[in-house]
Amino acid sequence: MVTKLGEFDVIARYFRRPARRAVLGVGDDCALLGPEPGQQWAVSTDMLVEGRHFLAGTDPRRLGHKTLAVNLSDLAAMGARPHSFVLALALEQPDPGWLEAFSGGLLALADEHDIELVGGDTTRGPLNLCVTVLGLVPEGLALRRDAARAGDELWISGTPGQARLALGHLLGEWELPPALLQRVLPRLEQPQPRVALGLALRGVAHAAIDISDGLLGDLRHVLEASAVGAVVELDALPACEVLAQQPQARRRACQLAGGDDYELLFTAAPARRDDVLRAAAQAGVAVTAIGSIEPEPGLRLRDAGGRSMAADFFPSFDHFLQP
Amino acid sequence: MVTKLGEFDVIARYFRRPARRAVLGVGDDCALLGPEPGQQWAVSTDMLVEGRHFLAGTDPRRLGHKTLAVNLSDLAAMGARPHSFVLALALEQPDPGWLEAFSGGLLALADEHDIELVGGDTTRGPLNLCVTVLGLVPEGLALRRDAARAGDELWISGTPGQARLALGHLLGEWELPPALLQRVLPRLEQPQPRVALGLALRGVAHAAIDISDGLLGDLRHVLEASAVGAVVELDALPACEVLAQQPQARRRACQLAGGDDYELLFTAAPARRDDVLRAAAQAGVAVTAIGSIEPEPGLRLRDAGGRSMAADFFPSFDHFLQP
């Protein structure tokens, strides 16, 4: 009999051990290494598998972009400045056209963020893309997920849910008119890591995490790590025009449980509201207050009419527990 | 029409660009990052794919060991001290027994080398293991592959060829009696990265590389990077007892073209011979002088009778060019 293990069980049960040398080990967006005084290295790795993280036939230029983007997003969520990365690549066959487009998309985003590809590995095998990214953050300024405090406001960047809305169309769960699809598809295929926002939030925000598995699921990680609870105001959730046109149930499912948006979810003291808005303006990203951190553990959803809703209605994504 | 690309072509053509910020970018055992004075970070990544780097059904404890060992070997070949690593893992299904054995083997080797797992990623997909390793080396002391000089002696640690001899048996290319197989199989399944030797060779050796794709193939990388040539004395190649009993053609093919041994190939000035031997004794590893570096480019093989042999008779391993 094989026990049903989720991906977070796998990490906690078999691979997590107390950090001895690292400032911060397994379990945040990045690990933090700090052997030299004054600054720390943020390290993160993400693996993309065909059929799981992207559909077969995805445009290779966009795939190259996304492969690096999801890793930069981890640095963003830590408030780290991107420095360099390595790429391990398994390919069934090296197709020059595919490689040129893939590396083009990857390196264009690297240039945009002034980050350097410093090494890698190529091998034959089922298509698999694995990037490890390195960034720098001044000592004590990293945005850790264990730093949320009761009383903090809860903020989200951008309009999460667009990537999930596009994916639902591609999977045949619902149908979007072509014009609307074209407006949400780039969020699935070419997410923009919020690196500038992460940097601007240093010293302003307390905790931060990037939304890769869904807003509620990723919020739960913050709450558990910080030993606090939260209330999310459902009607405060920002929606783009396309999301706003969707039936309420679909819209909320996309907003609360849709992964792959790579927006930042973060907390800050109410007294820092102006600083948060200034940081967002500086980074050129919209941010919205969507709730608050409370001392009582647990995650509570509430609409504008004061009605509550069960948070576990929106499960977050788990690679091993979902089909 | 798809051009036939080798793995080194893929790297050179699509991913290699001049290093701007890194001390050393794509193309050595590790990249070197050096933003702080006095020391540099060595970074390397290796991906292991089922059916390519290990056979299906490989004992998971040994596989955990090997996944980290091949990465530590890259640090060894750079003279870097292991610091930390991240693991990305794609699994079809999380089987607790497999995971316990795999993480057990991985973390036991990590403890042996006092290196810490600081992060990772788990996802569902065809079995794929990707480690990125970080080490430290004092500025100017890294053993780079572009540092070989004409007149250097060429050295090898241990007795390369054993892993290939074991693999040939498993693939049915030849048959070894069970008692002999048991003596070479551990070199294939549980290679010992030569970290202590790499550290002891700092300031003694000039260039170094680890033998992952075959002695001649990896030597060629050193020669190209250093713009020199070499002569290899075939009858000087060290052989373990099991290899020594093999027919000459098989023995030499295993020694010269067999990958997966993770021994160190390095060069040092003849005047440093005693220091090389002292470093080897300190690390508890045998080393053997097998030839010398010459100004004239190219790779020349010579036996004890002075007979020459074509080096391209022994192709090194390329993931895309071999079936």
Image (cartoon, coloured by chain):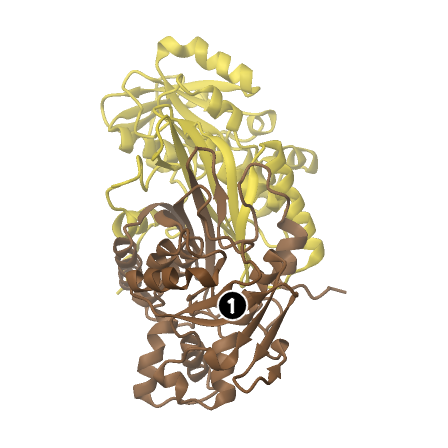
Chain colours: A brown, B yellow
Looking at the image, which is closer to me, A164 or B209? A164
Residue A90 in the image: state x and y as whole percent: 43, 56
The kind of residue tagged 1 is Asp
Residue B278 in the image: state x and y as whole percent: 50, 12
In the rendered image, which quarter contains the C terminus of chain B? bottom left
Residue A48 in the image: state x and y as whole percent: 45, 62
Most extreme residue toward the right is A1
Looking at the image, which is closer to me, B287 or A56? A56
A257 shown above or below A77: below
From the image, tell me which residue sits under label 1.
A213
> Is A78 positioned to the left or the right of A286 in the image?
right
Residue B283 in the image: state x and y as whole percent: 55, 20
Q: Which chain carries label 1?
A: A
In the rendered image, which quarter contains the N terminus of chain B? bottom left
Quadrant housing residue A127: bottom left
Residue drawn at the location 62% of the way across and 69% of the way down: A321
> Is B168 positioned to the left or the right of B220 in the image?
right
A259 shown above or below B290: below
The answer to whether residue B158 shows anywhere in this view is: no
Most extreme residue toward the front is A271
B136 shown above or below A209: above
The answer to whether residue A308 shows anywhere in this view is: yes
Quadrant housing residue A17: top right
